[in-house]
Amino acid sequence: MKILVINCGSSSLKYQLIDMDGEKVLCKGLCERIGMDGSVITHKVGGGKWELTTDFPTHTEAFAAVVKMMTEGEGKVINDVSEVSAIGHRVVHGGEKFQASCLVTPAVIDTINELAPLAPLHNPAGVLGLEAAKKVFGENIPNVAVFDTAFHSTMPAKSYMYGLPYEYYEKFGVRRYGFHGTSHRFVSKAAAEYLGKSPADLKIVTCHLGNGSSVAAVDGGKVLDTTMGMTPLSGLLMGTRSGDMDPSIPGYIENATGMTPSEFDAVMNKKSGLLGISGVSSDKRDVDNAAAEGNERAQLAKDMLVYQIKKYIGGYAAAMGGLDCVVFCGGIGENDNDLRAAVCDKMEVLGIGAINKEQNNKRGLDINDITGADSKVKVLAICTNEELMIARDTKEIVEAL
């Protein structure tokens, strides 16, 4: 079975074609600048890379270009779209309506649209992808929606409720939803398999660290709590997002500067985080380089991120009543050995001993066990694979039809 995995943005379309016999990636690529001038598709097969500049007025034309790349020319990996058994789509927000992946129907698309106010940048783009896929591939190829929020749906009310009037939850759905759920689910399962234990027997803190970052407490295979909230703005300091702060700050700054709420919302989402503190960049690597050259604000940004991750690991260990494993994943979590070492430093109170420095310096491993000799808690760096998780869910649902 070959499954096409799709991740649509408002002006982009990422894709991977995965042969589930051996879970091999046959090709992957990215369509950029959809609906804008200079749109382009980049297609990769093994070590080969092909780039084509063409017009993508809508996602439908982008899908058609993906089909052409997969079935024609040097980057051809299949003879015809009939070889694609199903399409799995990443959908950011499922709200309380979707607590698991599901087959896409007209009613499902309508509900995803209804949830758009909770994810105005992402859910409408997801719907565009779903509708475009049906146009290009036809109605006979099943489509499956896999929701970023679904894995977090096991959170109890004490975790997901805010201390606001209860009617705001009832009328407007104001609550913690959490994001990066597909990644947290993949790495927590991979950790359990590596440790040779059932997820039901483990208390794991998973740290998905990248331009967007979140930490989750996974107790017995279910999420007890997670740092992102109703939107992806809360929790940790991120590339350009502020993370947690006093909720009175927006009103204070708006009054002081004359900014509108939407203008300050843009500040919190696009001008804060590592970028806002360091004044250098939203890219952690640039911040690290600046700190190494003596930039004090860059060092402060690094220290803040490490401190916050430590704080959440400790808090979640307390909430779960124990800790068996800490997992680092995402672009920063998988590649930043200095950050992993700093987070684990002086954590003996939680049973996390000094990590294995030699192992921590290694890269390119699907699972890197950096646990120190004196550590009671396992510490792992795992390459997350959201696309494979989406493909697995899609395969399971389609095979059950």
Image: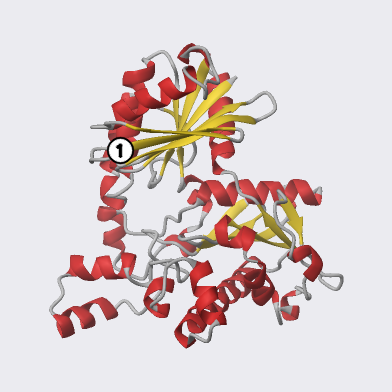
Which color scheme does this rendered protein use?
secondary structure
Q: Position of residue 313 (x, y in %)?
A: 61, 70
* Mark 1 burial class by Cα count in 10 Å: few <14, some 14-19, many 20+: some
Amino acid type, mark 1: Ser
Secondary structure, mark 1, is: loop
Find residue 339 and report its image quarter. Answer: bottom right
Find residue 212 and report its image quarter. Answer: bottom left
Q: In this view, does 352 lie to the left or right of 218?
A: right
Q: Where is residue 147 in the image (x, y as percent from the top left)?
A: 45, 42
Q: In this view, does 59 lie to the left or right of 385?
A: left
Q: Which residue is drawn at 40% across and 46% down?
A: 92
Q: Quadrant of the N terminus?
A: top right
Q: Where is residue 78 in the image (x, y as percent from the top left)?
A: 54, 17
- Asked if residue 131 shows in the view, the reply is no
Q: Mark 1 points at which residue?
A: 39
Q: Where is residue 57 in the image (x, y as percent from the top left)?
A: 23, 32
